[in-house]
Image (tube, grey):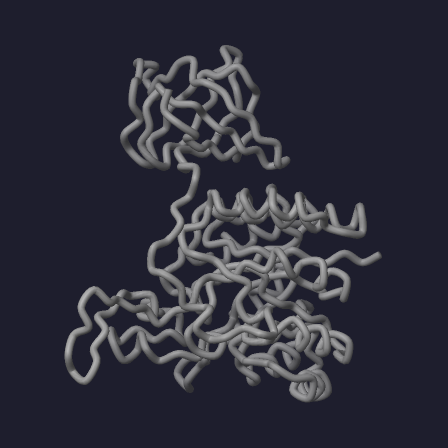
Amino acid sequence: MKKVELLVPAGDLERLKIAILYGADAVFCGGKQFSLRAKANNFSLDDLKEAVIFANKHHAKVHVTVNIVPIDNDFAKLDEYLLALDNIGVHAIIVSSVYIMKRAQELNCHFEIHVSTQQSITNNLAISFLKQNLNINRVVLARELNINEIIDIKNKSSVAIETFIHGGMCSSYSGRCGLSNSMVDRDANKGGCAHSCRWVYNLYNDNKLVSNQKCIIASCDLNSVEYLPLLLKNHIDSFKIEGRMKSAHYIATVVSAYRHLIDEYYHNKELKHNVIKYYQKEIQKAENRITYSGFYNPKIKNEALLKDLNVENPTQTFIGLVIKSNDKNNYVTIEVKNNFSKNIILECFMPSGKCITTKILDMIDENDDQLEVARHPKQIIKIKIKYKLPVYTILRKKKEL
């Protein structure tokens, strides 16, 4: 049986490697050109080459976003860039421009062409047109479709179907927004979105301030765990997680949860309530915005997407990333992410999905001087624990002793 692809965002090489090690079948990332996340640490061609080598080694794929909404001046060096991606061996490009789709075909590029959600595809007639005229390989559906509409499109489609299962949604139709352009002159459709919809606004009624009332325009984030069995049963080709700007902790936590849910379904042909409940709690360890099943619910009312502004803080704190496994004295080398003291209970979350709780026995800096507190993000230190930890283990502060 062909399994669904779990497609995961990567803002840089470190997060790409973490995504794959924690269970991604494929990753999507942006290059320095033509990508819709200008503020991300986008990949140079050398970075993409390293990414493809790493992915191939771990039987994963790399999809590159070429998804800006272009104007005439944006096409300079397009051919050169597409041919460079082809030469590197990327597995697919994600495209919103019909011309770029056409040009990739004319250049005889070997990678697949996936139609971006920026095209707002919501019906099979559009899919058939693109398949017939541009021979596209996959469509990333608009995020505004409900579960019944997605299943209907999949049953009728002649190409692979990809749908978002987790992460940010948009106040406009799948990213076609002008708020950021109007408010801060940052073009959302060129990758510069300022997320103006997530700002907190004062609420006025007839030009009078409504006291104690604040509002946002953005919806809650998407969490489709409860709809996963239906999506799997109906053989959706790819599940996409949103978030190229998200942290390594977020990526590892969310990817691992969905990886285990998907594997559990294929193993047992079902997802039991207690399993779903467990992984929902795991995902919440990384969330910093309220999540909801979004448009998947056919009976949704628009106001259901706009909830209380108070967000649920993560239940664990991301304090470090293992960059070198245990030495002969059992010291693990880590990069500090947030400050913490030696006097904590440590939760170690490994790429395998295994999670152990332990105490820090000793903590030293790079000069082997004793530490009681790690204060500085990106500081390299060593901690001594009684367990062996692999590289890219996520370290969380569970509680103070």
Query: Relative to residue 298, is residue 71 depicted above or below?
Result: below
Answer with left or right where residue 231 lies relative to residue 19.
Answer: right
Q: Considering depth in this image, is 108 or 195 the residue closer to the camera?
A: 195
Answer with left or right where residue 176 lies relative to residue 57.
Answer: left
Answer with left or right where residue 281 lies relative to residue 259.
Answer: left
Q: Is residue 206 visible?
A: yes
- Residue depicted at 45% across the width and 25% down the height: 346
Q: Furthest residue to the right?
A: 1
Q: Furthest residue to the front?
A: 211
- Residue depicted at 66% across the width and 77% down the height: 149
Image coordinates of residue 4 in percent, x first then y, are 72, 58
Image coordinates of residue 308 in percent, x first then y, are 36, 61
Image coordinates of residue 256 in percent, x first then y, are 60, 44
Q: Considering depth in this image, is 259 or 371 the residue closer to the camera?
A: 259
Quarter placement of the C terminus:
top left
Give the mark count.
0
Q: Considering depth in this image, is 252 or 116 the residue closer to the camera?
A: 252
Answer with left or right where residue 250 lies relative to residue 336.
Answer: right
Q: Furthest residue to the left?
A: 208
- Residue depicted at 51% across the width and 16% down the height: 327
Q: Considering depth in this image, is 398 or 136 the residue closer to the camera?
A: 398
- Residue depicted at 76% across the width and 56% down the height: 3
Q: Is residue 108 visible?
A: no
Image coordinates of residue 209 in percent, x first then y, are 16, 74
Quarter placement of the N terminus:
bottom right
Query: Relative to residue 195, is residue 22 depicted above or below?
Result: above
